[in-house]
Image (cartoon, rainbow, N blue to C red):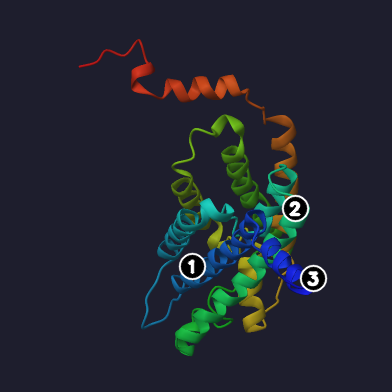
C-alpha cells in the first residue's frame, strides 16, 4: 500500500472515531429538534377564520411540542432548543465553549429550516391573516407595553425557565430524570399562557429569529435577544454559586438504593 493510500485510510479512520461521531450526532440532533420545535410549534399557532385557534390552545401546543422534542432528542443532545439554555448550560459547566457555539449554530439553522418548512407546506393565507398580519409566530410586544416592559417580561419568564434547567441539572436531581420532558413541557405551557399575550413568551432568540427573518419583521426584535440571554446569564450564575451542591458518590448510591423496594426495611410487604 502506498503512503498516500495509507494516509487516506488513517484520515478515514480518524473521521469515524466514536467521539467525533458523537459530536456530529449531538449537533445534528439539536438541529432537527429545533426545526421540529419551529415547525410543529408554529403550526399550532396558526389562527384564521378557516383554522380557528386560541391563545390557550397555542400555548398548550408549544408545551407539548417541547415535550416531544425532549423525548426524541434529549438523550442525543439534551434538546436545548434555545441559545439561552445553551448559554446557561455553558455557565453551569455542562458543555465546553466550542460545543456551545456548535449548539448555537445548529439551533439557528434548525429554526430557520423548521419555519421555512412551515411556509412551504401551509397556504399563504394561513401564514398571513387578519389575526397575524406580520406572519404567524412572529413575536412582538403588546401595543400597551413599552419596549422596557417587554424586555423585562421576557427576562423574568426566562429566569423561571432557566431556574428549571438548573434544577434539573443539579446533581441532587440525578435520580429524577425520567419526567424531564413532562416538566419542561408543562413549564413552557404555563409561561406561554401567562405572558404570551404580552410579548409572545418567546424565551428563545432562535424561536423569534426564524419568523423574523422569513417575514422581514424586526420590530423590537432586540427584546428577544437581550431579555432571554441576560436572564440565562444572571440565573445560571446565581443558581450555580448560591444553590448548587455537589453530591458525593456514596450519597448517589444511597439514594439509588433507597428507591428499590427490597432496600426499604421499614416498608411492610403485603
Q: Look at the image and tell me in which quarter the C terminus lies.
A: top left
Q: Tag 1: Cα neighbours inside 10 Å, few (<14), some, or many (≥20)?
A: many
Q: Which of marks 3 and 2 is nearer the N terminus?
A: 3
Helix, strand or loop status at disc 2: helix
Residue drawn at x 27%, y 12% is 268
Helix, strand or loop status at disc 1: helix
CB contact under 8 Å: marks 1 and 2: no
Residue drawn at x 46%, y 70% is 40
Residue 18 position by quadrant = bottom right
Residue at numbered disc 1:
41
> From mark 3 to mark 2, how far is it between C-alphas?
53 Å
Residue drawn at x 68%, y 54% is 86
Label annotation for residue 230? 2
Residue at numbered disc 3:
3
Q: Which of 32 and 24 is in front in this view?
A: 24
Q: Which is in the foreground here, disc 3 or disc 2?
A: 3
Q: Which is in the foreground here, disc 1 or disc 3?
A: 3
Amino acid at each position: 500500500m502506498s503512503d498516500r493510500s495509507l494516509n487516506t485510510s488513517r484520515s478515514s479512520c480518524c473521521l469515524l472515531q466514536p467521539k467525533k461521531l458523537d459530536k456530529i450526532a449531538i449537533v445534528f440532533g439539536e438541529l432537527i429538534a429545533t426545526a421540529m420545535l419551529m415547525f410543529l410549534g408554529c403550526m399550532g399557532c396558526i389562527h384564521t377564520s378557516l383554522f380557528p385557534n386560541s391563545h390557550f390552545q397555542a400555548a398548550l401546543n408549544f408545551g407539548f411540542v417541547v415535550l416531544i422534542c425532549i423525548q426524541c432528542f434529549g438523550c442525543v443532545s439534551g434538546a436545548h432548543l434555545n441559545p439561552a439554555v445553551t448559554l446557561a448550560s455553558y455557565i453551569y459547566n455542562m458543555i465546553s465553549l466550542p460545543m456551545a457555539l456548535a449548539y448555537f449554530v445548529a439551533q439557528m439553522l434548525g429554526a430557520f429550516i423548521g419555519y421555512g418548512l412551515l411556509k412551504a407546506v401551509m397556504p399563504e393565507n394561513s401564514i398571513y391573516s387578519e389575526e397575524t398580519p406580520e406572519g404567524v409566530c412572529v413575536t412582538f410586544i403588546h401595543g400597551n407595553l413599552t419596549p422596557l416592559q417587554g424586555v423585562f417580561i421576557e427576562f423574568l419568564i426566562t429566569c423561571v425557565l432557566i431556574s428549571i434547567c438548573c434544577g434539573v441539572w443539579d446533581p441532587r436531581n440525578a435520580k429524577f430524570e425520567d419526567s424531564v420532558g413532562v416538566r419542561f413541557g408543562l413549564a413552557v405551557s404555563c409561561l406561554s399562557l401567562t405572558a404570551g399575550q404580552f410579548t409572545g413568551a418567546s424565551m428563545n432568540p432562535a424561536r423569534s429569529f426564524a419568523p423574523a427573518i422569513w417575514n422581514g419583521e424586526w420590530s423590537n426584535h432586540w427584546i428577544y435577544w437581550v431579555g432571554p440571554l441576560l436572564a440565562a446569564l444572571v440565573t445560571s450564575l446565581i443558581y450555580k454559586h448560591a444553590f448548587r451542591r455537589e453530591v458525593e458518590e456514596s450519597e448517589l448510591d444511597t439514594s439509588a438504593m433507597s428507591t428499590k423496594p427490597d432496600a426499604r426495611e421499614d416498608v411492610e410487604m403485603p
